[in-house]
Amino acid sequence: MGRGRQKAKQTKVARALKYYSPETNYHALEQELKGSGHTDVATEDRYAADDDEYDNTYSAWNDER
């Protein structure tokens, strides 16, 4: 495929993306921005357990210095 054809296709795609305007769901956006105040406890616990492992390792290293 020649450079001219390739550039024409890229221009066509770029133009389609530039002028594409999907329908906006303002209610869903409002809910997302408000936040539900609900936190995922399982995710927080998983990360806390991972952090504890590293905290212990680094605290032992700091004690050696």
Image (cartoon, helix red, strand yellow):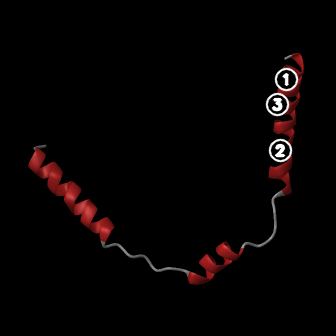
Q: 10 Å neighbourhood of mark 2: few (<14), some, or many (≥20)?
A: few
Pair 1/3: label in front: 1
Q: Is residue 62 above or below residue 25?
A: above
- In the picture, which quadrant includes the N terminus? top left
Q: 10 Å neighbourhood of mark 3: few (<14), some, or many (≥20)?
A: few
Query: Residue 6: x and y, percent?
Result: 17, 49
* Distance from the alpha carbon under mark 1 to that under mark 3: 12 Å
> Residue type at mark 2?
Arg
Q: Is residue 37 left or right of residue 30?
A: right
Q: Is residue 8 above or below residue 33?
A: above
Q: Is residue 20 left or right of residue 13?
A: right
> Residue type at mark 1?
Asn
Q: Which mark is residue 4?
A: none
> Residue type at mark 3?
Tyr
Q: Earlier in the sequence, mark 3 or mark 2?
A: 2
Disc 2, SS: helix
Q: Which mark is residue 46?
A: 2
Query: Residue 16: x and y, percent?
Result: 28, 67
Disc 3, SS: helix
Pair 3/2: label in front: 3
Disc 1, SS: helix
Total labels drawn: 3
Check the image and name the residue furthest to the top. 64
At a point 60% along the width and 77% down the height, the residue shown is 29
Query: Residue 4: x and y, percent?
Result: 9, 50
Image quarter for residue 49?
Answer: top right
* Distance from the alpha carbon under mark 3 to that under mark 2: 13 Å
- Residue to which mark 1 is pinned: 62
At a point 26% along the width and 61% down the height, the residue shown is 13
- Residue to which mark 3 is pinned: 54
Q: Earlier in the sequence, mark 1 or mark 3?
A: 3
